[in-house]
Image (cartoon, rainbow, N blue to C red):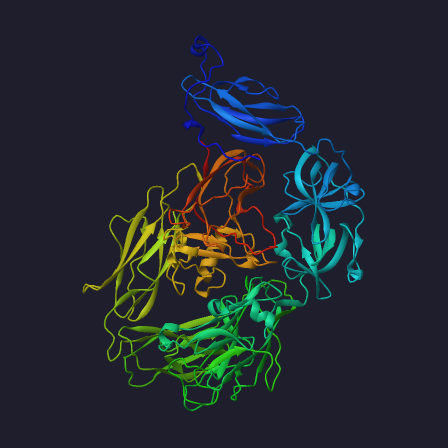
Amino acid sequence: MKIFKTLLASALSVLAIAFTSCEDELQFEGSRAIMISESDYVTHAGAHTDTLVIYADKGWKADVTDTWLSIDPKSGEGTTKIAVTFELNDSDDPRSAELVVKGSPFAGDVKSVITQKGDKYRNMNAVSVSDALALKEGDMVKLGASQIMALTTTGFVVSDGQNAMYVNGRVSEPVGAKVTVTGVITSIGGLNAIELEDAVFVSEGIASYPEPMDITDRIKTFAPERIVFVTVSGSCSGIVISVDDNEIGQIYNPVVSLGIKKYDMHNVSLTGYCARVQAGFIFIPIAIEDKGMAAQIYLQFEIETAEFKNANASFGTLHSFNAIKGDGYIKYIPENLAGTDPDGVWKMDISGNDPRCTGPFTGDYWLFYGNAPIKSGSVVRIKFGSRVSKTGNKYWILEYLDGKTWKVAGTPKVSEDTDIPKVTYTHQQADDGSTNITIDETVTFTRNVEHGQFRFRSVTSKQANDGSVLTKRNTGSARLAVSSAKHVAPQPMILIVSEGDGTAIDPLPANITVSADYLSFEGTPAGPKTLIVSSDQEYSLSTSATWINVDVTGGAANEEKTVNVTCAPSELSTLREGKVIITSGETVKEIHIFQSAAGQDLEPFISIVGGNTKNVGKDTGSISVDVQANIDYNAEVSEGADWITIAPVTKAPVEIGSFTLDYAENTGEERVGKVRFYNNNGLESVLTIIQRAAPGANVYFEDTFDWIEPWSSVASNGIGDSVGDNHPKASGYAPNLYTSAPLADLLVEFQNRYIDLNPASRVVYPQKNYLKFGKTSSVGQMNETGITINQDIFPDDNLDATLTFDYCPQVGDANDKFDDFTMVVELSGDGTVDGGKISNPFKVVIEPDANGKYNLKWTAMSFDLKGVGKNTKVTIRPESMENATVKRTRRWFIDNLKIEKAN
């Protein structure tokens, strides 16, 4: 193993070594800059020759400090590969020597510690895999040359041509290579395997596989005692393999190259190695054939069981629970909680093993969210049960997100109650508080979506028992339920009835006409105002806020409707704004509604929607800025900001004006420009644009994570700074990037930059401005993850680079100590790190202070990348990523990630 990376050769300067006389030194014009490719090098006990590299700009001389080690050549000019030859170490103990390189008298000695392992297996006869299978747990074993047949993230399968066996431990050699293996017989769920001590490369090769045994039709009775080569046809959900809708086992710690994610929710034919362990079958595939998506489960949940309650103890805090099949969750999203819950009655809990909300209100919804894409043309069915208490909300609407438009799922109806404005709904709750209703609807997606989303939304706060309309949250409740006294509903489930072809046909845009682009109301409205609406396609009307009501919910194609718009009296001290939304086919038109503060008329104003500061990247680009005003105004760029361009415009009163601001590439330091929106009477609003500085010419990739900043206050409790504030147990608020609805756009930003190695566990958490990964893993869980940089990093091939980042493990395990685990850097494609594809494992040890407290603090990490190129991908992750056998924590933070040209 290569333990430590030597940095910046140009900084090496100490005294010269005395290989020659002082007179010889004066005649020797040696290098002033010297570096050895490995400063600590560990190798196996056998007699062999390895290669190291001496980096130098001029002459150098080298030697070793012990006779069991030799090098060739011992001197040279410039960068040179040297052969390092090891004699056999025929003892149990490791031994070490130094490789010492000398350059100019003005430079110092450069040393590398060379360690050769001992060989406690030297007196053992090598055996075949077939012989090793007969050994018992705890026996030492030495395999003769055996071929690597398949890889996992934690080990590999070897074969002697007759039988195969699993070896628990990583190797850098590829499939097909032959290696000798030493280790100890161990058990993985009852399966005999080898716990790796050392693997020594023997030769390259190409794996030749036997004819696979098809076990699909005999899966119920198939019980091999060892690893066998098979093929099986079934469906894939994450890493779980099912046959005839019955889960039979899992793909064991799959390597990234298998691309497991693309097979999620697909029928597959899997070929590879299989073994039966205590928990079921494990599969180590060499090939997966995609058989297409079947009519199958997209998301399946199981509520109303003790197992559900026990597994979701955190529901009261997270407000969500995960699917038992498929990758997704259900979450309750409250609307305007701060403004509707003055008495603090709202809460989430599990009641009678059902997920329940106390204090539902207009605009709240249950969100069904899937992490797998759905193709256009797909027919999708959703079904579940729901119930409210007698004083819970009466009317709800089921909707699904088709592209960027929320559409009604089911048959829309219009309420007939006389004490509330008319509302459009799809489902009415029972009024007795004890009867479930069943929601069972089928829709066809016309757009490709990355995430399947349905929501079941409350459209009024009128109580189910026809009591009064609520003005604030009460102690009524809403729940998802299966069993009740009078009705049994289905478990929550989303099914792909048939998969579309993914060809989204753009519909003809609708021609919506409306009599006004905006309406304005006083704080205490005198009465309704009207809109006259029509479209050449069927249309519907809705509002964006509960204080706006319309008495018409839609019309037929070419049908003109007069719509009365009313506003509730405002109790606010400031202006508020909402919308009447007209949807016709794929076309949406928004009518802006403005209401002055309580008891006031509208005062003149100019306001920039979304805040007065925008951060932009260094490259050429543009941003869209919306300006809301009720007076005529102009726009201009401030003096000295000629890198920003905008066309001067004048806008009509109370209109949302949308401006496109173009900005040029920044080749220098960070710069600031201002855009002024103003009228001639001194009223103005100023937008500040901050453009990021250009990185140096030698920087290939840099991320300071400042892109998180715009979301720092969006989440319900903001985003904290656990490391900076040294919060115990990292309690600086860290919302879940996957499950926090306000962070949906931030998740997209993250996915544009990085690939989450374990997205199914949803364990990425933004901090201010950096990222945290991982949470506690119980037995059978893997709640840790790593990241791969999701872009082409290097402009050319055969480059050397330096990777740096700030790293911190989380403090606050069960003993209030730091999470004690190791991390690695991994390369795919061209290049090496620490001489292989995976770096030496690294771990930051945090020592307690004088009071016994373990403090969060950043540690700067650095790695040399050799021979990287255009196809190189860089990954940072925990060394071991597998399901937990005991409860554990592997949580970590990262900041200031940078890859630059090596010096």
State which quadrant residue 636 falls in: bottom left
Can the viewer see residue 446? Answer: no
Nearer to me, 77 or 140: 140
* Residue farthest to the left, as pictured: 681
- Give the percent coordinates (x, y) of residue 763: 51, 57
Q: Is residue 867 left or right of residue 853?
A: right
Q: Nearer the viewer, residue 95 or 384?
A: 95
| Residue 789, image x, y percentages | 51, 47
**Residue 82 location, quadrant:** top right
Indicate whether 294 appears above or below 186: below
Q: Quadrant of the N terminus?
A: top right
Q: How many marks?
A: 0
Image quadrant assignment for residue 120: top right
Residue at the spot 73% in from the left edge and 51% down from the top edge: 191
On-image quarter of the C terminus: top left
At 51% from the left and 44% from the top, the residue drawn is 792
- Taking 172 as reference, is 54 left or right? left
